[in-house]
Amino acid sequence: MCPHFICDRNRCRLVWDKPSDNSLKNHCLTEDGWLNACLIFNDNDKNPTLNSERERAEKKRKENERKEWLKTEDGKKWIAGEQEAFEKLINSAQQGDVVSQYELGIKYFNGNYEIEIKKDEKKAFEYIIKAAKHGNKEAKKWLNKKKINKIFRIIGLIIGIVVILIIILMILSMFI
């Protein structure tokens, strides 16, 4: 008999006997074959809290690795190359290249702290609208997508206001 934990959703319990093999996701066996105290999840149970924490930790680890790599000589060369490419993209967009206008708009919309492109939605829309006016299909699709998202946000806001008004009316009707 050996202690182990079985977790169901957000609760864990300590169990002193070995559970059946079909309920184990991870046996946690040591080299000598003994079951150590470990966290065991049933396959049917999902724990989104732990998964999202793992994902955040993994994302942060990768981000830190990337920051460390950018400090190396290869990273510095990459940054210099990206900055040079960004400057060429600006020149090309200003000379009227439609694809460059769209790409530059997207870069401004997303921003990039590594090569010091500050997020600037005004510039982003300016360049993407220019590209769309000159016939760039990707720019037109992107703008339509943003318009649809805006319409859905407005519809959601209106529905929320209506629900709040109904609740207020229901509460007031209780007092009348």
Image (cartoon, rainbow, N blue to C red):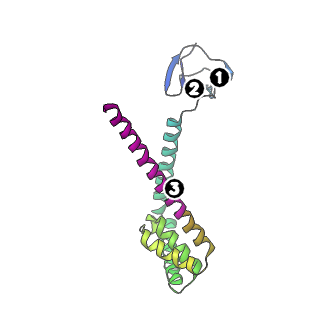
Position of the C terminus, as image quadrant, is top left
Residue at image position (54%, 85%) is 96
Residue identified by numbered label 3:
152
Q: Dots 3 and 2: beta carbons under 8 Å?
A: no
How far across and down, in percent of the image, does residue 124 sit? 47, 71
- The magenta segment: 147-176
Other-residue count near label 2 (Cα within 10 Å), few / some / many at <14 / 14–19 / ≥20: many
Residue identified by numbered label 2:
40
Disc 2 marks a residue whose amino acid type is Ile
Q: Is residue 122 left or right of residue 132?
A: left
Question: Which is nearer the eye, 59 or 139?
Answer: 139
Residue 15: tell me if it is visible.
yes
Front label number (3 vs 1): 3
How far across and down, in percent of the image, does residue 87 sit? 48, 79
Does residue 23 sit above or below 92 in this rendering? above
Q: Where on the picture, by quarter, is residue 19?
A: top right
Residue at image position (41%, 68%) is 118
* Secondary structure of the residue carrying numbered label 3: helix
Label 2 and label 1: CA atoms lie apart by 9 Å
